[in-house]
Image (spheres, grey):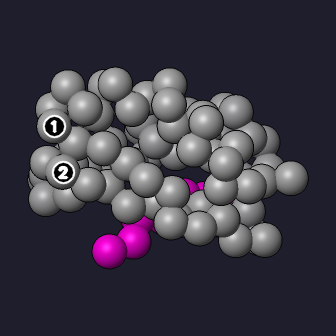
């Protein structure tokens, strides 16, 4: 079962890479249909490469750890 805590634990693995560029990511909520909402913070929030970071970094890492995730979405 997906929980905010399990997603947050998985994000610990990629968090250092985001923090190198003064960015970060936080879990907003986990929906029952396998969608995870996250918020990019710091310099990641306004970076023109944020969509690539979300898809190739955050989403890929989370889907590797949690097969039940269907999609990761960025929210405000």
Report helix, strand or loop for mark 2. Answer: strand
Residue 73 locus on image (x, y percent): 48, 64
Residue 42's label in the rendered image is 2
Q: Which residues are magenta?
A: 70-76
- The numbered dot on residue 22 is 1
Where is residue 48 drawn, in percent x and y?
Answer: 13, 53
Q: CA distance from mark 2 to mark 1?
A: 6 Å
Looking at marks 2 and 1 on the same chain, the residue that comes earlier in the sequence is marked by 1
Q: Which residue occupies the extreme front position in the image?
A: 5
Q: Residue at x 70, y 43 (%)?
A: 6
Measuring 38% from the left and 61% from the top, which residue is drawn there?
Answer: 39
Is residue 67 found left or right of 56 in the rendered image?
A: right
Q: Nearer the viewer, residue 3 or 52?
A: 3
Q: Is residue 68 visible?
A: yes
Q: Secondary structure at mark 1?
A: loop
Q: Residues within 10 Å of mark 2 (few under 14, many from 20)?
A: some
Q: Which mark is residue 53?
A: none
Magenta highlight on residue 73: yes
Q: Nearer the viewer, residue 56 or 8?
A: 8
Q: x and y percent of residue 17 in the render? A: 31, 25
Q: Quadrant of the C terminus?
A: bottom left
Q: Is residue 19 above or below residue 43?
A: above
The answer to the question of whether label 2 and label 1 lie on touching residues, with beta carbons closer than 8 A, is yes
**Left or right: where 33 falls relative to 17:** right
In screen coordinates, is 10 left or right of 73? right
Name which quarter of the figure residue 64 lies in: top right
Q: Could one spot residue 60 in this view of the protein?
A: no
53 falls in the magenta region = no
């Amino acid at each position: 079962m997906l929980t905010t805590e399990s997603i947050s634990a998985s994000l610990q693995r990629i968090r250092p890479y985001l923090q190198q560029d003064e960015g970060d990511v936080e879990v907003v909520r986990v929906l029952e249909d396998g969608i995870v909402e996250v918020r990019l913070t710091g310099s990641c929030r306004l970076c023109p490469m944020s969509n690539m970071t979300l898809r190739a970094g955050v989403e890929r890492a989370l889907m590797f750890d949690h097969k039940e995730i269907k999609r990761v979405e960025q929210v405000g």
